[in-house]
Image (spheres, helix red, strand yellow):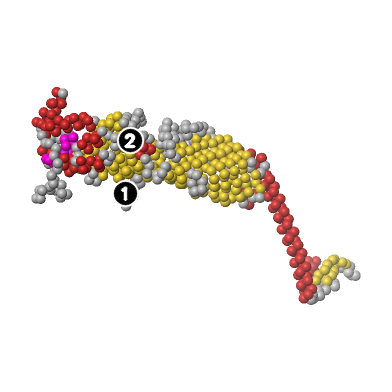
Amino acid sequence: MSQTPNKEDANTQSSSIIRQLQENKPGIEKSREVVIDKNGQKVIRVTKKRRVAMTEEEQQHKKRHSLKKFSIFSALSVIILIAAGILFFMVRASSMSSPSYAAAKQSELSQAWGADVKIDGLSIENFQMRVVSLTATFPENSNIEKIELRGVRGDIGLRSYINGVLAGDILNVDYAKITLRDTTSAIRIPRFEGEQMWEFKRISCKEFIVGFTGNKAPFTLKSSAYMYPSSPGNHTLYLGQDTERPSELTLRGWETPITAMKGAIQISRTGLSHISLSGDIGTNASISLDGDAMEGTSPQGNLNIESSGVALSLLTNKNISGFLDAQTRKDPMSLNKTAVKAQFKLPYGDLQQPEVTGELTLRNIRLSKLPAFAYLINSLPKDKVDKYISPTFSQGNITLTHMPDGGTKIDLVNLNEFTVFEAKGSIIIGTDNSLSGNLSLGVPTRITSQKYTDQIPDPIFDDDHRTSWLNISLKGTVETPGDNADELEAKAAELRKMRGTDEAPITPTLPGTQTTDGGNLPASPSSAFPSLHDPVQTDAPDVRQFENTLNIN
């Protein structure tokens, strides 16, 4: 089909022809070309294919054919992508298992830690990362000497292959050991500045050890452990949660280790921000430690100790059980009272055993082997003697202090067995186990006054109308304790002669006899007879006469 153009210009003719072609819709345009007609004019020849309506079956066939071609194309695309992915992961895994990758990681970690890092047996296969061993040796200005990891393995994800960072959920370690130095005076933590070796949500270790080189290690910790990241740069280390594996802390100077140990340690960039450990020590005894160990502080730690059932001899590092025996007791907390806690120092540096200072709550406190008890018993009625042969306090408090010369001071803060016995004073134990200090042993006046018919306590006591005190000075050693009770007895014997009162059985209180509210005879006033320890009676003529007699002898 053709049409001769009018006399319009060429642009108008072309637009007219195109418009006519668009309006002539039947059929489908197959081709077009420019030809010269018989009159020598250029015309456009358009050839169209006749449009024939397809049947429904032909349409379905065409759709199936198109879908088949698309399916084949899609399948081929997926196969190609999978093959490319597998090839990529194989190449990536191969490169990450290569010595060059391990060497690169070694270099990165060495630079980040400022340490000498060695990685052996790094391999990645089937989305699992394995490391035979990893060792980091730190410079001498660090508290950490070496870190060793063995049997490291963990499942990694796609992220590890894409960006090269070993990452996953759980990293398992068969053996981990941190070796510390016993030569630094302050805690110094290695700074890590760089990319992490791996990023896992949890690190689990079957055998975790913290110790020192040499045979006289300050302490050795052995336990199972796992660690979580708690915040950026901070981790929480849990110890002893696997009850099937042993967990213990051995301390230099203590023969008995702390066993069945459990606890948690908060690890930050500048040290151990919180330590909470507890365990058993011996039979029916337990210890709890809490505190911190931050950079710049003493490696002996800033720790508090609570204990129950622990022998006082262990906490004093002195075998004092021969004359002072006791076990610790956890002080029950009340609404207006916090738990009594003492301070605990690790045996680090020159300290050869743990050092405990501060207040301790004790139970089953027993005083014995002091000569003063023989004189005390001799001054009591025979039916009261059995309670004072080896007096025991059900509970009480003491305060431990370490002297500048290396000795230990024990202050009896509150030892009072109600209506039976009291004790106060200080016990000082020297580095050579020598004993010194002063003790006051108190017995209720109503008991000490029963031996004499005048109801006045024996002059060996210093009586305050409520309690009769036997004030003694300690001497001797821890193994063979002594006191000055014989000197007190010598002076008291002279006062008994001057007193002129013989011993006599106590007669029952007659009806109508004046008594106190407690049913006891009223205590005699102090002016009734001078006491050996009563300073206000030094002007009494009988006391002056006794002192003159002692001076002449």
Magenta-colored span: 452-463
Give the percent coordinates (x, y) of residue 245.
51, 46
The quadrant in which the C terminus is found is top left
Name the one closer to the observer, 502 or 347. Answer: 502
Q: Residue at x 30, y 45 (%)?
A: 394
Secondary structure, mark 1, is loop
Residue 26 visible at all = no
Instruction: Confirm whether the magenta stretch covers residue 456.
Output: yes
Which residue is pictured at 54% across the width and 41% down the height?
A: 176
Residue at image point 32% right, 51% down: 334
Residue type of the residue flagged with mark 2: Gly
Q: Position of residue 59 (x, y in %)?
A: 77, 73
Give the total number of marks visible in the rendering.
Answer: 2
**Residue 192 drawn at (x, y percent):** 53, 40
Check disc 2 and report the residue beneath it: 322
User: What residue is at 79 percent from the left and 68 percent from the top?
Assistant: 14
Name the quadrant of the N terminus: bottom right
Q: Do we see residue 367 in this rendering?
A: yes
Q: Which residue is mark 1?
A: 337
Horizontally, is 5 left or right of 292 in the view? right
Q: Residue type at mark 1?
A: Lys
List x then y, in percent, for residue 470: 21, 36
Query: Of 452 and 538, which appears nearest the observer?
Result: 452
Would you say residue 219 sits in the magenta stretch? no
Residue at disc 2, secondary structure = loop
Left or right of 36: which side holds 393?
left
| Quarter occupied by residue 194 | top right
